[in-house]
């Protein structure tokens, strides 16, 4: 088979299923840092994105999920040197995290949202990232969830079509609003039915029955963000059982990153090294 034909067949194969994970496959788990963990320092400019790369090296993690909120620019003058810094340090900028709201009631507003998604796809491609965390958004007052889900499907479908041309996956996060429940997330991803539209699993975002809901969206998951707390029932948080979560990923055949997104009160300078050491240990324990 010619190389071009082979690549076309490989890209088309996943279209038969909306799932991101092949059932029964051997897991492959890698640790990562979500830049949002250093949000205060990045916002105050006491820490740069190059410093985040250094933190990955210092803590012996493989990847970075670069939250873009504090990017000084989206020009090549910033993006290309950052990509080079990561490469020279053996760190993979595998994902960027952006804000979106796809629950837009008019075609014009959805087109505007799509244009923003396309902009970030281009940024991800320049950084060498194969994944973008996106939000579904909030159902507008007076409109039904079914209507809003259809709008998300519209934007996500067209966004995935564009993203796929650069080999970038759009990961729809469980982030409240239209994505508050696992069943709705799976419904949206199945309706989009593209290998370039999957799920970004945030382990701390479900407001109840977290482990059960995580199990529902796991087969569609392309990236995982680990939190230190989890909700087992509405209004009650408890310490997240990372061993249980990692075992779920491994049993489910997940291959990819487990990115620490730190939000607790302790200073990340002291908390992150301890938590990342634990994440590294779990990745080795359960990875194939």
Image (cartoon, grey):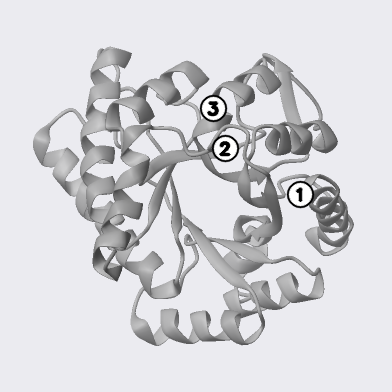
- For residue 243, what is the image quadrant? top right
Q: Which of pointers 3 and 1 lies earlier in the amino acid sequence?
A: 3
CA–CA distance in space, label 2 to label 3:
8 Å
Q: Nearer the viewer, mark 2 or mark 1?
A: 1
Relative to residue 164, is residue 248 drawn left or right?
Answer: right
Q: Residues within 10 Å of mark 1 (few under 14, many from 20)?
A: some
Q: Nearer the viewer, mark 2 or mark 3?
A: 3
Relative to residue 188, is residue 201 drawn left or right?
Answer: right
Q: Nearer the viewer, mark 3 or mark 1?
A: 1
Residue nearest the viewer, comparing 288 with 240 = 288
Q: Identify the residue at horizontal 71%, vertical 46% (top origin).
A: 263
Relative to residue 90, is residue 6 drawn left or right?
Answer: left
Residue 201: image tag: 2
Do the residues under discs 2 and 3 have CB atoms within 8 angstroms?
A: yes
Q: Secondary structure at mark 3?
A: helix
Q: Identify the residue at horizontal 10%, vertical 40% (top origin).
A: 108
Q: Is residue 18 above or below residue 121?
A: above
Circle 1 sits on which residue?
A: 287
Do the residues under discs 2 and 1 have CB atoms within 8 angstroms?
A: no
Quadrant in which the N terminus appears: bottom left
Q: Which of pointers 2 and 3 lies earlier in the amino acid sequence?
A: 2
Q: Is residue 66 above or below residue 255?
A: below
Residue 217: image tag: 3
CA–CA distance in space, label 3 to label 1:
20 Å
The spot of residue 134 in percent (x, y) is 41, 45
Relative to residue 35, is residue 275 drawn left or right?
Answer: right
How many tags in the picture?
A: 3
Using the rendered image of the protein, determine whether residue 174 is visible from the camera's viewpoint. Answer: no
The spot of residue 155 in percent (x, y) is 23, 39
The spot of residue 285 in percent (x, y) is 86, 48
CA–CA distance in space, label 2 to label 1:
18 Å
Using the rendered image of the protein, determine whether residue 285 is visible from the camera's viewpoint. Answer: yes
């Amino acid at each position: 088979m010619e190389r071009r034909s082979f690549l076309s067949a490989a890209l088309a194969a996943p279209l038969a299923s909306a799932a991101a994970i092949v059932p029964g496959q051997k897991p492959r788990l890698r640790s990562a840092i979500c830049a949002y963990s250093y949000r205060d320092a990045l916002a105050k400019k006491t820490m740069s994105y190059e410093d985040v790369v250094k933190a990955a090296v210092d803590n012996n993690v493989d990847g970075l999920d670069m939250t873009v909120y504090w990017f000084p620019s989206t020009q090549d003058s910033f993006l290309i040197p950052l990509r080079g810094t990561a490469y020279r340090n053996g760190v993979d900028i595998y994902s960027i995290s952006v804000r979106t709201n796809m629950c837009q009631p008019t075609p014009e507003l959805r087109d505007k949202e799509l244009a923003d998604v396309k902009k970030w796809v281009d940024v991800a491609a320049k950084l060498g990232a194969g994944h973008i965390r996106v939000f579904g958004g909030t159902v507008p007052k007076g409109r039904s969830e079914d209507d809003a889900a259809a709008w998300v499907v519209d934007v996500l479908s067209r966004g995935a079509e564009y993203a796929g041309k650069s080999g970038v996956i759009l990961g729809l996060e469980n982030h409240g609003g239209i994505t508050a429940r696992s069943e709705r997330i799976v419904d949206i991803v199945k309706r989009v039915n593209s290998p370039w539209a999957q799920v970004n699993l945030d382990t701390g975002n479900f407001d109840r029955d977290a482990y059960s809901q995580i199990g529902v969206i796991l087969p569609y998951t392309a990236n995982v963000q680990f939190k230190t707390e989890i909700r087992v029932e509405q209004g009650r948080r408890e310490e997240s059982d990372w061993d249980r979560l990692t075992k779920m990923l491994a049993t489910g055949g997940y291959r990819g990153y487990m990115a620490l997104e730190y939000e607790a009160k302790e200073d990340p300078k002291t908390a992150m090294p301890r938590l990342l050491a634990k994440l590294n240990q779990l990745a080795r324990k359960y990875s194939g």
